[in-house]
Image: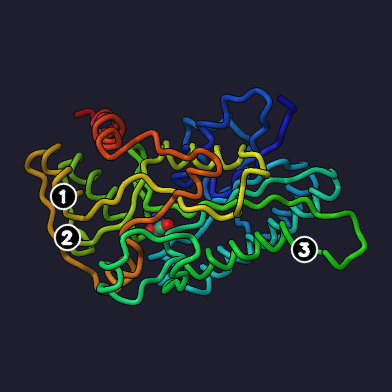
Amino acid sequence: MPNRTVLITGASGEIGQALIKSLSGNEFTTLVTVDLKELPEELSGKSKHFVGNLLNKDLLSGLEEEYNFNMIYHLAAVLSTTAEHDPLLAHQVNTCSTIDLLEIAARQSREQSQPVKFLFPSSIAVYGLPDLKTKNRITTIKESEWTNPTTMYGCSKLYCEKVGNYYSEYYHQLADTEPVRLDFRALRFPGIISAFTIPSGGTSDFGPEMIHYAAQGKPYDCFVREDVRIPFMVMPDAVRSLELLAEAPMENLQTRIYNVTSFSFSAQDFKDLAQNSFPGSEIYFKPDPKRQAIVDSWPADVDDSAARNDWNWQPEYNLQDACQEYLLKNISNLYNL
Ligand code: SER
């Protein structure tokens, strides 16, 4: 395998930490990571880490000067709930930093005369169902359907998908220069559950938060109704899907944007799981109307058959394994139960 240099932004976040663990074992890979925060101690030394804000142009130009990237995992983002508190900040972080990184990837792909892969975590937030009646009627949703996001987060993810596709397929077609070989690929993730980290700022957080609170014996006020249902997957599958898509031969890909999922789960399902696993858990449903409205606009499930057909995507953890083998086992270890 040739040596390669991989950039991960948002590296101290939930997906970032899991991705570093997975990629850092490879002796041919040089990892460069960026985040507003330091990496947790257990990951220090696994990458060359830069603490800084992606909106700082000096940071980005310094990285561009120092490294030739072969692959960029651009994970940094303001998540859906936080974005509704500060839509302008979400726009800047989610879209401006993406464009700046796409520009770097485009320039470097031209200089290196070889593709720079750009992996982008998109989201079920790009979907926007108009009302609950429609949500209950639609069982699964395909990539091309209902892309009418109701949040700034969803709008910014959808825009970045389009722009990433533009940079890969059309950018500079009229200019008489070396072609850009940027290879943008995006996954529309469902809610992601990690056994090791607790999410913050998202709206799918009610699921993982509930389980982590219950394991610690803390009461939990769930901010959505019990009947709320959206798709989920566990972190090892999320990371694996990113890596599988990154490695898939381009000729197999019929699109640059794919749904992936594992199982559809309701807030009541999470409560049942928590109470069966950690008896005595106190969980109360206290819906917050604004966060409730966000999840009501997201589909109960997505159709990931394109990913299954084009690059053999299949989650390793079905519902039962996700709960028993991954979540409960690891969460119990984490809290010394
Ligand atoms: N997990 C994200 C959020 O809730 C959705 O992709 O914001």
Q: Which residue is mark 3?
A: 171
Residue extending furthest left? 280
Q: Residue at x 65, y 49 (%)?
A: 118
**In the rendered image, is residue 91 in sight?**
yes
- As helix, strand or loop, the secondary structure at mark 1 comes to helix
Q: Are marks 1 and 2 in contact (CB under 8 Å)?
A: yes
Near-viewer residue (315 or 153): 315
Please give left or right for residue 329 compared with residue 95 in the image. left
Quarter holding the N terminus is top right
Residue 204: horizontal and vertical position, in percent?
Answer: 33, 57
Amino acid on which the number 3 mark rests in the picture: Tyr
Q: Which residue is mark 1?
A: 271
Q: How many other residues sit within 10 Å of disc 2, few (<14), some (14-19) or many (≥20)? A: some
Residue extending furthest right? 176
Q: Residue at x 48, y 33 (%)?
A: 41
Please give left or right for residue 247 compared with residue 222 in the image. right
Residue 150: horizontal and vertical position, in percent?
Answer: 41, 74
Up/down of 157 relative to 212, above or below: below
Quarter holding the C terminus is top left
Q: Which residue is mark 2?
A: 226
* Residue 306: image tag: none
Amino acid on which the number 2 mark rests in the picture: Glu
Amino acid on which the number 1 mark rests in the picture: Lys
Residue 47: horizontal and vertical position, in percent?
Answer: 61, 34
Please give left or right for residue 42 compared with residue 285 in the image. right
